[in-house]
Image: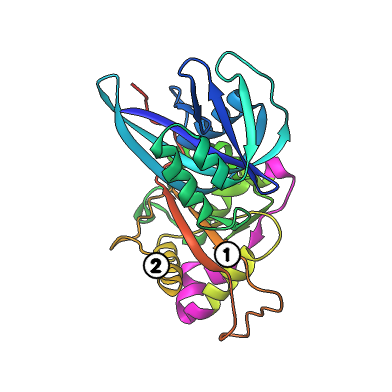
Amino acid sequence: MIRAAGAVLWRDGFVAVVHRPRYDDWSLPKGKVDPGETVPAAAVREVLEETGFTAVLGRYLHTLSYPAFGRPKEVDFFSARAVSGAFTPNEEVDELRWLPVEEAAALVTRDGDREVLDVFAACPPDLATLLLVRHAKAGKRDNWVGDDDLRPLSSAGWRQAAGLRALLPLWGPSRVHSAPRVRCVETVQGVADDLGLDVLLEPRLSEEGYWPDREAGLVRLLEVADGPGVPVVCSQGGVIPDVVATLASLSGLPLGAEVPCKKGSAWVLSFRRPEPGWSTSDTTGTWPRLVSAHYLPTSLAAPVP
């Protein structure tokens, strides 16, 4: 399998389309995943190399599958907001155009890129993003003597936490929240340290705090999602599948029969922001509605052939 990644790069209501002289085509920025690189990291790198723009990822959009050089190829696409930079012609790309989505779809050479643009256009680009993380590995509970709340990460868990410390910043997080368990806090502490922030404790999002009042836990997560910037929230395996499945059901978003939740994994949840005047106490009014839920089973890069 050839793995690749790309993005619909956007700013101010326009998307970027690039011309590649090697193929004489118009395309969305994309390219192969390098060895030791995650797919989201490849998407950000390819955008920078082909367009000159540093980008922050948003929602997952679509995966294109097709044969290439006698092998199957998959290209994962994300929405990506241009943060800074400027285009300079290079060997891979000699021209970049910022266009409305409709004009970009008419210009690109391949139908696959049009499929991706159609998915991008189905929702506003400036959705609210929340990164919901399950704590990393912390050994077996039976082998820990003492208060289970204090059980720390194992050596494998620290490797997963290091991977999350590199992966999650691709979405530009600005706040870090965690269930009040040592293993949960340790999983995202590195992200908070890099931002110069404290980890904000969320008792409602621990297993013991969530299940006595699920509605209050869900409301708390929606409050966090509706705050400024992009939050990281670390919780537990007894909470995350129910949260994701419930929010998807309430929003009419189809998911599989099971919601995966491996230790050290993350869900990229994208919400439509509520209308002005929304209040969490107004259960009949509008509230952040989940429009995309993308699962990242690991923070660690897989070997690339």
Amino acid type at image mark 2: Ala
- At x 52% / y 73%, what residue is drawn? 218
Instruction: Give the SS element for disc 1.
Output: strand
- Give the SS element for disc 2: helix
Q: Quadrant of the N terminus?
A: top left
Which of these two is toward me, 187 or 256?
Answer: 256
Foreground of the two, 228 or 251: 251
**Colouring rule applied to residues:** rainbow
Q: Which residue in the structure is indicated by mark 2?
A: 245
Identify the disc placed on residue 106.
none
Residue 147: image location, x then y, percent = 49, 62
Which residue is at a point 66% across and 80% down the rendered structure image?
Answer: 279
Is there any visible trace of residue 154 in the rendered image? no
Crowd tier of the residue under label 1, counting other residues whose Cα lies within 10 Å: few below 14, some 14–19, many 20 or above: some
Residue bearing the label numbered 1 = 272
Q: Name the image quarter holding the C terminus.
A: top left
Q: Which residues are magenta?
A: 193-215
